[in-house]
Image: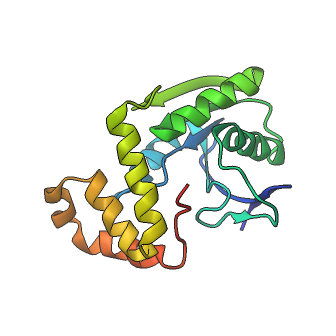
Amino acid sequence: MPFAESTEGSIFYQMDGRGEPLIMLLPQSRGPRGVNALIDLLSKKFNVIRYDQIGTGRSHLGSGNYDLSIPNRANEVATVLDSLAIESANLLCHSTGCGIGLATAYMLNKRVKSLILINPWSYADDYISTMQRLRISAANNLSPYDYAHFNFTMLFPAQYRRLHQKEFEQIAVKAISQPHNPD
């Protein structure tokens, strides 16, 4: 498996397609359909690069304490770029990934060719702040399996969850071995 190494940990990444580099900065919570259809389409014109943030998925946290701040997440993008010897890339960002993308563009402005923001939010109103605190509390107090189901309930409509019940269950079972970091 390919990894980009940093002092903070090992960052797992995948590449699909050929062409200009396009780094996907996506939220951790994805449904059963995921982003594969989008990646298949984009990989016809781009070298699509996905990675697991440090401490999530197949990436590994180093031995020290790692601050899960947006600037540190932007440093992870720089680590992936450096590891692949990519001078500049396009960033496709969704939800929380938009904050990471903006921080990356600020820190590495000449290395960011374009910034595509999907569903960005630039501030946290009372509702968003309350929901994020609730999700952090749930992640701290529920098993990874139960937290996955809790998160699905927060993010997806009931009709969609019913339609993809088996796939959501598979994701929840997988979460047991790859839990989310509550922060």
Q: Nearer the viewer, residue 52 or 126?
A: 126
User: Which quadrant would the N terminus be assigned to in this image?
Assistant: bottom right
- At 48% from the left edge and 78% from the top edge, which residue is drawn? 176
Q: Quadrant of residue 65?
A: bottom right
- At 40% from the left edge and 63% from the top edge, which residue is drawn? 138
Percent position (x, y) of residue 77?
A: 70, 42
User: Which quadrant would the C terminus be assigned to in this image?
Assistant: bottom right
State the scheme by which the image is colored. Answer: rainbow
Is residue 32 in view from this perspective? no
Q: How many marks?
A: 0
Q: Answer left or right for 145 relative to 166.
A: right
Establish if 138 lies above or below 177.
above
Q: Answer left or right for 36 relative to 91.
A: left
Q: Quadrant of residue 171?
A: bottom left
Percent position (x, y) of residue 35?
A: 42, 51
Q: Nearer the viewer, residue 23 or 59?
A: 59
Percent position (x, y) of residue 169?
A: 31, 75
- At 38% from the left edge and 73% from the top edge, which residue is drawn? 172
Establish if 178 lies above or below 134.
below
Is residue 115 in view from this perspective? yes
Percent position (x, y) of residue 7?
A: 86, 55
Establish if 180 lies above or below 76.
below
- At 48% from the left edge and 48% from the top edge, which residue is drawn? 27
